[in-house]
Amino acid sequence: MNRFVPAENLIPAQEEVSYPLSGDGKRVIENIRGSGREEFIKKGLPTTKVESWKYTDITPLTKMSFSFTSDAPHQIDNSGIKKLLPEKLSECTLVFVNGNFDNDLSDLPETKGIYIDNIKNIIESGNHSVLECISSPDEETDPFTNLNRANLNDGAVIRIGENYDPGFPIHLIYLSANPGSTGMSHPVNLIIAEAGSTISLIEEYTGDPDHTYFTNAVTEIHVRDNASVTHYKIQTESMKSTHIGTLKVRQGKDTEFASYTATFGGSLTRNNIKATMDGSGSSSNIEGLYFLKGDQHTDNHTEVFHNFPSCSSIENFNGVLDEESHAVFDGKIYVAEGAVQTDSEQISRSLLLSESASVDSKPALEIYADDVKCSHSASVGQLDADSLYYLRSRGLSETESMKILTSGFLKEILNRFKNESVSEKIENLLNSEIRI
Amino acid sequence: MENKNMLNIDCLNVKIEDKQILKGISLEVNKGEIHAIMGPNGSGKSTLTQAIAGREEYRITSGSITYKDMDLSGMAPEIRAREGIFAAFQYPIEIPGVNNAYFLRTALNAIRKHKGFEDIDPFEFLKLVKKEMKKIGMNEEMLKRSVNEGFSGGEKKRNEILQLSMLQPDLAVLDETDSGLDIDALKIVAEGVNRFHGPEKSIILITHYQRLLDYIKPDFVHVLANGKIIKSGGSELALELEKRGYDWLSSLSESEGDCK
């Protein structure tokens, strides 16, 4: 088997690289699309022969026939969308349907210290300098980022001004619903938190439960010096969908970044989360929970790069697996030469509710500095018999006790989330998903 | 005439895996009585607690436990709890992620449902639980925390007493509830137990030391050694044990009313 396979069914034809809108930003976008296409074609999609894809086979994507949803945003009527649209968790909510920004469904408050727009609008309005911050494909070796760039269409662009804190989170909703065709969307999100600013960002990916589709999102976050960014991702995609979500974070000096990922949906899910600390005194906490059933497959892939001294990081995931589901945790901590006084911890814990469920865990530490504290642990287990008995001895039935312990295992992570609306939403999801 | 009997243990033999732990115990507890069971470590005290509470790994090989005229063999622990049996654990289990208040309310509602009552109103519950917490000197913050997680030894024991006072069982088996408590905490826990006690409530106190019995006066004291009750008496027996230790009793391998 080869390490890569061609997947030209996933990229637009050469003549379609030209962007369907006019405007000054058109050329910037076309350059990104063109080079993304070129880079993607060079390699194609990784097979399980590539180490970082060892446990996740994404090659079935090469056999699927996709319609390019960017060309047909309105295949579903408004009432259909409204039924599928999740509850807004902020006064500032951007809604994307099949990858396209929908102004009517979105709420954008007037604010001075914050710039919020979507890529399509930026191209037309001409103020496109911000788009230069989108990482260009030649900096990328990741095939899914190149694929995302090749299909660049729309996405959110947010810039929080220096020392500004809007006081509300920004909620980004990506809804996929394509009756009659297999769609795909490639959201490109760019968030810049300028020096000293504070922001919470909620990314939510969901879709029509009856539809088959492919989401390949790339979100880049720049956390400038002294800024603080909290990121949430709620994923309840269709059980027939493939979801690849890439989060790339670059942190300056004395920054705080935290990411909380909750995965419930998707037939196949891959969360790529990469944080790079390019300044001292920063912290990066990457945490997540997942609940899988049926033959769902979820792969959480985290990488933290400690390039400067006195930074701390946590990679912490708890997951529950029922039926024949499969999870992968692949966590990497990289400590560069000179990054002394690094404090880094990596924990992956899984709870198996069925004998047919399985987990592959692959921690990796690469340390090139002295005077660092790095630890990792991985555990896979069943419900604890002592805890089960303790609950039953207080009058709770066996099934009720199992349910409480299962959701408790995930709440260990959920309790660390800092946004009440997000926590409430996920708690409701836990209550409806965990049926024992 | 009304049946005064709460618990009747008859020639009970209990095995864990292949190890015989209890070797023919008989014990009768009537309504309103407090029984203390004392004995050295490894004598089978905790096994007795768990056999009454219904832990499945503790297998009854012969003999029986009858509670309020019901044979407990094969009865699930949750049914025993709903019928009014409560065992305070020597080592209460930490359950991360499970909210303490939620757990306690769910347990209370399970018991209420069994008795034919509706769920308690959440506000009523909160009022009640805060009142009880105040009595035993627990910080209200502990309601928001996960069950026993990060609690000190003393806090865990108080949490057990909080459950006792909220769930209002008829038979409480307190397994070394005094261990790990300083004297002030011991008094508070003892007061909680005494408040619970009444003419319809029975208590079995399992303890290694006499000092708890300074604050909770037992009607009967039994000495458990090597899986058997080797001596029974009134509360004065506890004082004698305190003075003389357990060694002088070790010759009493066969006690009165021994089971074959």
Image: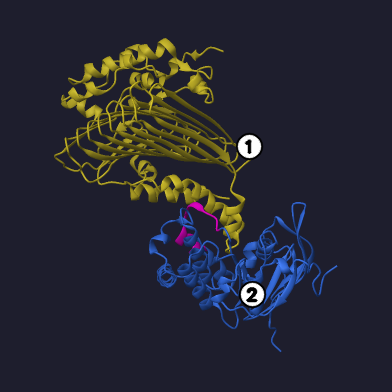
Image mark for residue A356: 1
Which residue in the rendered view is the most extreme toward the right?
B260
Q: Nearer the viewer, residue B17 or A92?
A: B17
Badge 2 density bin: few <14, some 14–19, many ≥20, Cα 10 Å: many
In the rendering, at what x and y percent does residue B119 appear? 50, 69
The magenta stretch spans which residues? B92-106
Could you say which quadrant of the image residue B244 lies in?
bottom right
Chain in blue colour: B
Mark 1 closeness class: few <14, some 14–19, many ≥20 residues within 10 Å:
few
Which residue is disc 2 drawn over?
B238
Residue A345 at x, y = what percent?
43, 35
Amino acid type of the residue that numbered disc 1 sits on in the rendered structure: Ser
Q: Position of residue A191 (x, y in %)?
A: 26, 31
- Mark 2 residue type: Ala
- At mark 1, the secondary structure is loop
Q: Chain of mark 2?
A: B
Q: Is residue A23 left or right of residue A19?
A: left
Residue B13 — which label?
Answer: none
Classify mark 2: helix, strand or loop: helix
- For the residue pair A181 and A319, the one nearer the viewer reads as A319
Using residue A248 as the reference point, say whether residue B101 is left or right of it: right
Q: Position of residue B235 (x, y in %)?
A: 64, 79
Q: Is residue B260 above or below residue A39?
A: below
Q: How is the model colour-coded?
A: by chain
Q: Give the residue furthest to the bottom.
A: B1
* Residue at the (55%, 63%) spot, across then down: B179
Q: Colour of chain A?
A: yellow
| Residue A27 seen from this side | yes
